[in-house]
Amino acid sequence: MKTLEVRNLFKHYEKFDLKNVSFEIKPGKIIGFIGRNGAGKTTTLKCIYNLAKPTSGEVLYDSKPIIDVEADYKQEAAMLIGEMNYYGTKTVKSLTNVTKKFYKDWDEDLYHRYLETFNIDENKQIKALSTGMKVKYGLALALSRGAKILLLDEPTSGLDPVSRDELLDIFLDLVSDKEHSILFSTHVISDLEKCADDIIYIKKGEIIVNESVSTFESAYLHYEGPSEILGKNASKFIFYRDRLGKFEGIMKKKDEIDAEEGVEKRKASMEEIMVAFERGEQE
Amino acid sequence: MKKLLYKEIVLCTNVQIILFTAFATFILIPSWPPAIAFIYPLSGLMTLFPTGLANKDIEYTSLLPIKKTDIVKAKALYLGLIEITVLLLAGIAGLVRFFFYPAPVEADQLAYFMATRPSFSLYGFALASFGVMNIVLLGMYYRDPYKRLTGPSIVSLIVCMLLLTAGTLVIAFVPALREYDAIGLAAQLGTLGAGILLFALFTFLGYRSGAKGFTNIDL
């Protein structure tokens, strides 16, 4: 079982720094990679696939630096950034015919099954595919090449809800053999709730959460009620809104307070936690 | 590398490259200096990188299971392949011109420019010029492939044309490089051999220079 390890990754840009990013991708896991636009998700993914050169730190696959085993590593790891928007005037068929030559474990039957599932016409030009279709085509290529690790940058963006649900089912089927693993970035929090085992949360270039989805979800509480009860507890909330006599806020479970009468307390949703993380400093 | 070269041929060859490469047969046009046959095809090559940018060629290739530097190597080989195709087409057309066109009798220097027969020396100079062009084009372009489009093309094109012109002048003023007696033939074939070696060496150096810059580029 081969593991992908990201160790102490730093990447300096003029206006952005990726700082000390470390995590592991183990077989059998689906990891959701979340954070705001510009938080460093794509930069991290690019460093993991040697598309961007880290300022320091390393990425190891099967305990070897990916730089040393780049071609072999890329046989076993697939990267998909957004939609498949290359060589617009070529047909799906001609681009596939070139692409598949590079993969020794290419599964032609599986590829055609995905084309059928995703309703992609092989004879269409790439530029004639809709955004959603381009995403699906990229996924069909990535899933048919026998990669053990899938690194997907917002794979569900541009997909309709049904296609998104189908895709998440495919993800779950894929990792059920305990050989595959998936790291996917997304803004669609419901995707994570449906299929992710673990969550990696990046904010301003730093990983601030790296734990199982269930641990993450159960660590925060949501309170809602009249403003008066906020009182002395305000400092315990990592984020709250107090508008027109009503308030709602997110608090860590370890800081839990008793809910007074008229206050609703429940487990916070992932989306609420994410908003609290990002806006907590602002309000 | 065979797969990458196949990818370059299937996905990166455009109509302009095919059309302008075919202009290597312009050597058949009577009274045109044969060097023209090597200059026209360069226009097709200059479309390679802008078209690649529009097609997101680097982005696609970088996702394939290859080393990052192989992207530059494949492009260098593809450039070389087109240039060799130009040479072969010009070679075949040159043979037709050599054997079937009337040779200029007692031509003076000016007539030589206007109506000369192609020589092996010219092909040698053309190869060396292509090699220098590859160094400039690959070395400059891959240092910043998202911004440097016009500069590398124009500079490499001018350098190549100047070298071809210089080659034509050298052939004009050194009779041994265009004559077909024993000494002339030896000098011509020697120039061609040197051209072949310089083409291979310069294209390799172009790859090395491009790959070195490209390694540091974030895609």
Image: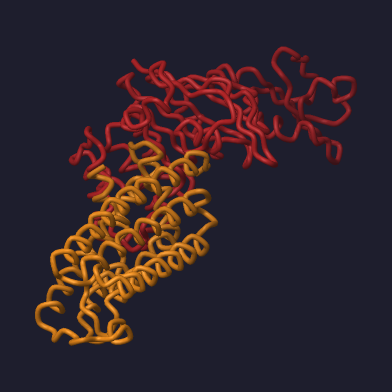
Chain colours: A red, B orange
Residue lying furthest left: B100
Q: Nearer the viewer, residue A93 or B191?
A: B191
Work out whether A59 lies above or below B28: above
Residue A135 visible in the displayed image: no
**Image side of residue B98 versus residue A37, left or right:** left
Above or below — where is A259 with respect to B126?
Answer: above
In front of the other: A31 or A69: A69
At which x and y percent is residue B156? 45, 62
Q: Horizontal placement of B2 versus A258: left or right?
A: left
Residue B36: x and y in percent read 31, 76
**Could you say where residue A186 lies in the image, as x and y percent from the top left?**
52, 38
Residue at image location 25% in from the left, 85% down from the top: B115
Depicted A112 relative to depicted A32: above or below: below
Between residues B11 and B160, which one lies in front from this camera angle? B160
Which residue is found at the position 18% from the left and 74% from the top?
Answer: B94
Query: Quadrant where the N terminus of chain B lies?
Result: top left
Q: Is residue B83 visible?
A: yes
Name which quarter of the figure residue A3 lies in: top left
- Tell me what residue is drawn at x 31 percent, y 43 percent: A140
Q: Which image quadrant for residue A241?
A: top right
Q: Residue A46 at what x, y percent from top left?
A: 50, 36
Against A275, residue B75 (above or below) is below
The count of marks equals 0
Of residues B91 and A18, which is closer to you in this image?
B91
Q: Residue at x 28, y 61 (%)?
A: B83
Image quadrant of residue A178?
A: top left
